[in-house]
Image (cartoon, rainbow, N blue to C red):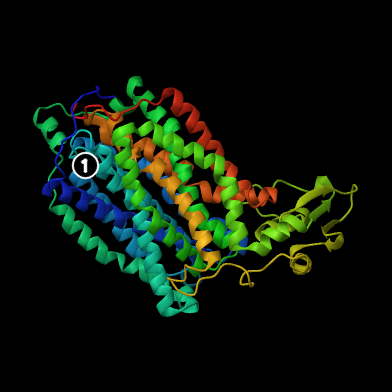
Amino acid sequence: MATVTTTSPRAAGMTKDERFVILASSLGTVFEWYDFYLYGSLAAIIGAQFFSAYPPATRDIFALLAFAAGFLVRPFGALVFGRIGDLVGRKYTFLVTILIMGLSTFIVGLLPNAATIGIAAPIILIALRLLQGLALGGEYGGAATYVAEHAPPGKRGYYTSFIQTTATLGLFLSLLVILFTRTILGEPEFAAWGWRIPFLVSVLLLGVSVWIRLRLNESPIFQRMKEEGKGSKAPLTEAFGNWSNAKLVLIALLGGVMGQGVVWYTGQFYALFFLQSILKVDGYTSNLLIAWSLLLGTGFFIVFGALSDKIGRKPIILAGCLIAALTFFPIFRMITTNANPALEKAIETTKVEVVADPKGCGDLFNPVGTRVFTAPCDTARAFLAQSSVKYTTAPGAAGSGVKVVVNGKEVPYTDAKTSNSLVAAAVAAGGYPKAGDAGIVKMSNPFDIFRPQVAAVIGLLFILVLFVTMVYGPIAAMLVELFPTKIRYTSMSLPYHIGNGWFGGLLPATSFAIVASTGDIYAGLWYPIIFALITVVIGFFFLPETKDVDITK
């Protein structure tokens, strides 16, 4: 880590050049996140378009995993483009990444679906997602490093916090474009072909972003280092082959970014998935609810980034992880109370049991979506989980058949084809609502926010976004300050993209798989809670405070 400096913050505000650096870096990064998040926001529709050969439940898992594929390769993008950024420069590296991202997104909008070209459709889709992930792996580290290396001492948290808003602004922009397109075309047309429009219009954003970034100059700190001949000849070896630096990479990951990643993806992506797939809130309303919470909360990235310049990065990040871990369960339960009160009541009052010979029941944990369940005990439980029904499993007599017991009423279960409809009727009679039922929160237009039910859900989602801003606002400054200039791009990019790309990106699919395997709609929250708490412990004891270091070294 760089040495501590006592240089006092510059009193004046941002210069014109500094404002342009932040604007250009941020606009390009907003565009990249917009591209990346279009897929996540449209996962259900994309699943139907490109994985239509599979049953709905498996289709949802495949769609989420195709989304996660982009996250899985982000650390490899961090290695490839981080090395180039430390060897060649920050500016040209994130010009390349934005071109890869933009063209990949545009092609998704043109890609024929599975009904047209068969298995080639999902294969090409996943390949494009991998390209997007590689590009994003190189983008963030470059933008954050570039801005930080332009920032005066004592204001790096504030300056880099504008970069931190870009992920949320990119998601917000994607939701706005989706909502506008949905409103103009209507849901049937949007699901059939209109979903392509947000992908296709991204080519316009790409042109603007590239034009702006071409006007940037190289980072002054990096340029001076290159002129003095102090640059790294082997960034990967120096970053990860040297234990003193590799140790910092590991601490940054486990004591900072891992917890930040799971809190972030719970507050934005899993919250959206929870509303749509578990609480059965329609897609239009779900996107509006998330969009309003992001609009209300995004400014707090800058608040917490600036605050970290005064009190430090570490206390804000760890406090955000701890508070989130302690409150996720009550917040998501309150979201259920307000978004789908009939479901909450049914969970509390309707007792559902699957009674079967334990030898005929397998493990339903299926985060990669490749397992096919055929045993009646397994298909019965999988159907209940997909219907958001809380159930327990009770042992039956050896060799006995499977039955689903709803409030004492037995429904014999032989196979999914003949028995699922009977189980659906029984749980509906027991009080479980279906998608579209009265009482489920619904918005008729973007400004329908003053009804108590809608306002309550937005308020709860806003709290989740507030946790996101606490953990994410200061993280860029902290990562930049941990590592020396000559290997900064490489060193900071890897822990960031493992923490966010792997721990965060796999969260929706893994949490949903936990829900399916336990029969408890809240059980998936254990995933982010456990990892956030691990980060709190490791970060408290091992993560150094970085706000006063000299990053010119």
Nearest the camera: 446 or 553? Answer: 446
Nearest the camera: 440 or 475? Answer: 440
Q: Quadrant of residue 245?
A: top left
Q: Residue at x 15, y 26 (%)?
A: 230
Q: Is residue 74 left or right of residue 532?
A: left
Q: Residue at x 34, y 20 (%)?
A: 244
Position of residue 161 measured from the top left corner of the image (x, y, whole percent): 30, 44
Tell me the SS state at disc 1: helix
How many labels were placed on the picture? Answer: 1
Image: 125 above or below 114 = above
Q: Is residue 307 visible?
A: yes
Q: Residue at x 87, y 59 (%)?
A: 408
Q: Is residue 84 left or right of residue 426?
A: left
Within 10 angstroms of label 1, few (less than 14), some, or many (20 or more) residues?
Answer: many
Name the image quarter holding the N terminus.
top left
Name the image quarter holding the C terminus.
top left
Image: 546 above or below 362 = above
Q: Quadrant of residue 348?
A: bottom right
Which residue lies under the disc numbered 1?
146
Q: Is residue 374 visible?
A: no
- Which residue is situated farthest in the left direction here? 227
Position of residue 291 measured from the top left corner of the image (x, y, whole percent): 42, 61
Position of residue 450 measured from the top left corner of the image (x, y, whole percent): 48, 68
Position of residue 360 measured from the top left corner of the image (x, y, whole percent): 80, 49
Residue type of the residue flagged with mark 1? Tyr
